[in-house]
Image (spheres, rainbow, N blue to C red):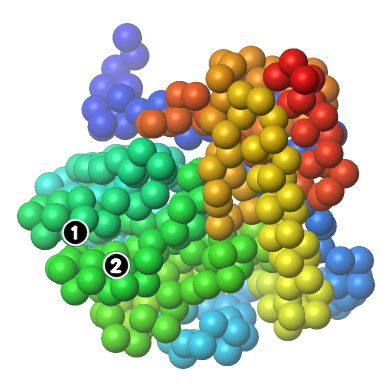
Amino acid sequence: MKKSLDIVKPAVRGLRAYSLSPHRAQVKLNQNENAWDMPLALRQEILHRFEQMRWSRYPDFIPASLHENLAEFSGVRSDQIIAGNGSNELIQAVMMVTIGPRKHVLMCEPTFALYRQVATVLGGNVESISLSNSLQYNSALLFSVVEERQPDVTVICSPNNPSGCVIDDQDLVKLLRIARGLVVIDEAYHEFAQHTIVPLLEQHENLVVLRTFSKAMALAALRVGYLMAQADLVREIRKAVLPYNLNSFSQMAAECAVDRYETDLRPLVKRIINERQRLFDDLSAIKGLTPVPSKGNFMVVKTELDPKVVFEELLLRDVLIRDVSGYPMLKKYFRVSVGRPEENDELLAGLREICGE
Ligand code: PMP
């Protein structure tokens, strides 16, 4: 055994690396991306601005113009915002300033696996409560565990990935009152739920909200996310963010996306929401499949077949989905992103064949 590995924290040695299967397919429904790419006119404007930028210069130390843009867009002040290299970076930042040995993170699983990963790497204890049998937030259990254990950080994704459930506003307010620690609400998919809890920031100094440009904003390749909280807390979290974390190109592209959200991007979100309903109805009609209603641009589907077989069989038909059967509670499930209509048709045709229809 190499000695150097002994230096690595045992909790890290015990982790399986967060990874994604390297498969590729024509119909890509495995990462909850925006099924439509950024509209051409917007891409061209971004590229035009890119050409005029000074590439030899560092980005802004703090991307102030993007912060201002986001503040107006989200209804908070610019000193309440940190933009980052994907919301992943900000998940890490908020945990870095709060979590270490003897600190506790509470999450409701199954959920986005990175939270457990980062908390564990930082030496924190992760406590987890299960979603209900119908894969919804179990508020009564959440209240009692938070009250009793008072975790340093409670994480709730709303909509949750992969179950698609959301936390009720009143339940969240109650939770924020009970919790002495931080409550992180990950709103990566809020556009598809047509709902946000950002207005609660004004009243609740223990609330942190995370958002991303990787889903509705169709910019996953450029890695932009942002965090919102009250200004005092933001100032502390910023200490864990590296200088120049956001490159100039991504910053500028994100500003353009915000400027043109209403005209260019919101219509795509509406189409995805419509397709989500259509996909749900058509999946429900396939024998042996039970989709779970979702507020995101994805859903999990219960299958009587082995989900791994469904994954492999769809891949043979050039359709890539997410195998989530290793997640807690999801042994019999797979996850699909909502694609464009023709992509969803291919998925449905494949599934009908696989299910023997
Ligand atoms: N939060 C949730 C709930 C997610 O599902 C994801 C990505 N799948 C992220 C955050 C990470 O997003 P980003 O691309 O902004 O790092």
Between residues 133 and 208, which one lies in front from this camera angle?
Answer: 133
Q: Is mark 1 within 8 Å of ligand 1?
A: no
Examine the rendering and report whether any part of residue 315 can be seen: no
Between residues 355 and 207, which one lies in front from this camera angle?
Answer: 355
Residue on which the image places disc 2: 171
Q: Pointers 1 and 2 in contact (CB under 8 A)?
A: yes
Residue 230, located in which quarter of the rendered image? bottom left
- Kind of residue at disc 1: Phe
On screen, 122 above or below 268? above
**Side (left or right) of 339 relative to 203:** right
Residue on which the image places disc 1: 143
x then y, percent, for residue 232: 29, 83
Residue drawn at x 77%, y 33% is: 348
**Side (left or right) of 110 relative to 140:** right
Sequence-earlier tag: 1 or 2: 1
- Kind of residue at disc 2: Asp
**Side (left or right) of 154 relative to 247:** left
- Quadrant where the N terminus sits is top left
Between residues 19 and 93, which one lies in front from this camera angle?
Answer: 19
Hey, which residue is sitting farthest top in the picture?
1
**Side (left or right) of 8 relative to 219:** left
